[in-house]
Amino acid sequence: MKGIFKIVLFEFNKITKNKKTLIYIIFLLIFFSLSCLAYKPLIMLKNYSNYDAEKILQENIILRDNYKMMYEYAYKIDTKLPDGMILSPNFFDLKEDYYYQYLRYDFYVKTGTSHQNYLDLKNPLESRSGLEDGVFILIFGNISFYLIGILSIILALKICISDYDNGNIKNLIQSKLTRREITIGKVIFLVISIIAMVFAITVTGLLISNNGGATNVLVIGNGKVRSINTYNYFISKMMINLICGLSLAFLGLFFKRLVKNTYFGGFLSISCYFVSLGIYSLISSLFNNDIVRENVKLYFVFINTQVNDINYYQLPFYFILIFYTLTILALYRIIYKKEMMLDL
């Protein structure tokens, strides 16, 4: 245990005592923060100046009743349709969407609200004017997914691989530290570093958003509709961004042990993400069905959090956390075995 702690402390000192590395980290944080501050005032939303609450309520009642009729017919709850109504060829394929829309408009009617009261999760910039802070935090969470993923891979290669590439690993072994202690210590420091990075990014987003927590998003799932605070939704997204970043880091280490070139290993791990996006696009083009596409988005590896309103109220949120945790443990087991057999 002492040897593992020494490695963690060694990696910490290697960063804090390296002025060049510290300057890079500080510059990156400052540049990222300033970029966010500069982008926020550029958010322009729709101005619904002619807001008529009574008219919108009547429209919502009509839409609710229409979607109720359509989903009940699609599910064969009610076999009657208005005279002259023509069904689309894919009517029954969209029955889940009809139910989703019914729940949404039924919630609007019961609460006396409308789409203007909530942020648009799928298209944040389509939200109404006055919700800029909330829109910023949503966009910030989406962008953070890519930033965290790339930085996690870089940290993994820097912390766990650089000493092997420059030969310093032999010095560590000669200091009476075992390979087991070195490997576990580096992995622990990597996990701590990624958690610290995600925490810093999360705090930055919350500070810049200013009043984003005063806004709400509408979440529909498991037959229920919930209005939740935007900050709570953002925290849920950052938790999944964290677990995805950790999985990409371990994926980078895994590929590095399969190839000789460190940069090529990092490239392969990033490529896995883009390949998964390509597969999703292929499935979307082959199956011209909104429900199939939504289900693929919901459970497909690496893209789920970017295209769905995943949060801690929904079962897929915990499915994703468990899936990535098991993936990380499996990758760590493989990496650990390869490290023990590595010829120095």
Image (spheres, helix red, strand yellow):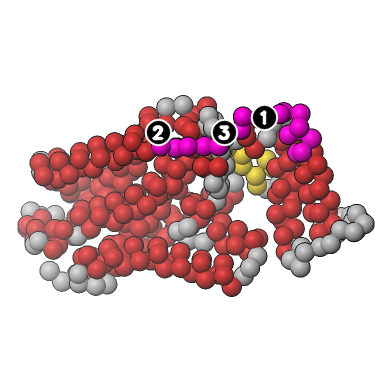
- Residue 292 at x, y = what percent? 63, 64
Q: Residue tagged by mark 1?
A: 51
Q: Residue tagged by mark 2?
A: 41
**Alpha carbon separation for disc pair 2 and 3:** 16 Å
Q: Quadrant of residue 126?
A: top right
Q: Earlier in the sequence, mark 1 or mark 2?
A: 2
Which of pointers 2 and 3 indicates the residue nearer the eye?
3
For numbered disc 2, what is the local secondary structure?
A: helix
Q: Are marks 2 and 3 in contact (CB under 8 Å)?
A: no
Q: Quadrant of the C terminus?
A: bottom left
- Residue 159 at x, y = what percent? 20, 53
**Alpha carbon separation for disc pair 1 and 2:** 24 Å
For numbered disc 3, what is the local secondary structure?
A: loop
The one of 204 and 177 positioned closer to us in this rendering: 204
The one of 83 and 319 positioned closer to us in this rendering: 83
User: Which residue is located at x 27 percent, y 63 percent?
Assistant: 266
User: Which residue is located at x 46 percent, y 32 percent?
Assistant: 133
Looking at the image, can residue 252 be seen?
Answer: yes
The one of 52 and 300 positioned closer to us in this rendering: 52
Q: Are marks 1 and 3 in contact (CB under 8 Å)?
A: no
Q: Is residue 341 magenta?
A: no
Mark number, residue 47? 3
Report the side of 159 relative to 90 (left or right). left
For numbered disc 1, what is the local secondary structure?
A: loop
Task: Report the amino acid beneath label 1.
Answer: Tyr
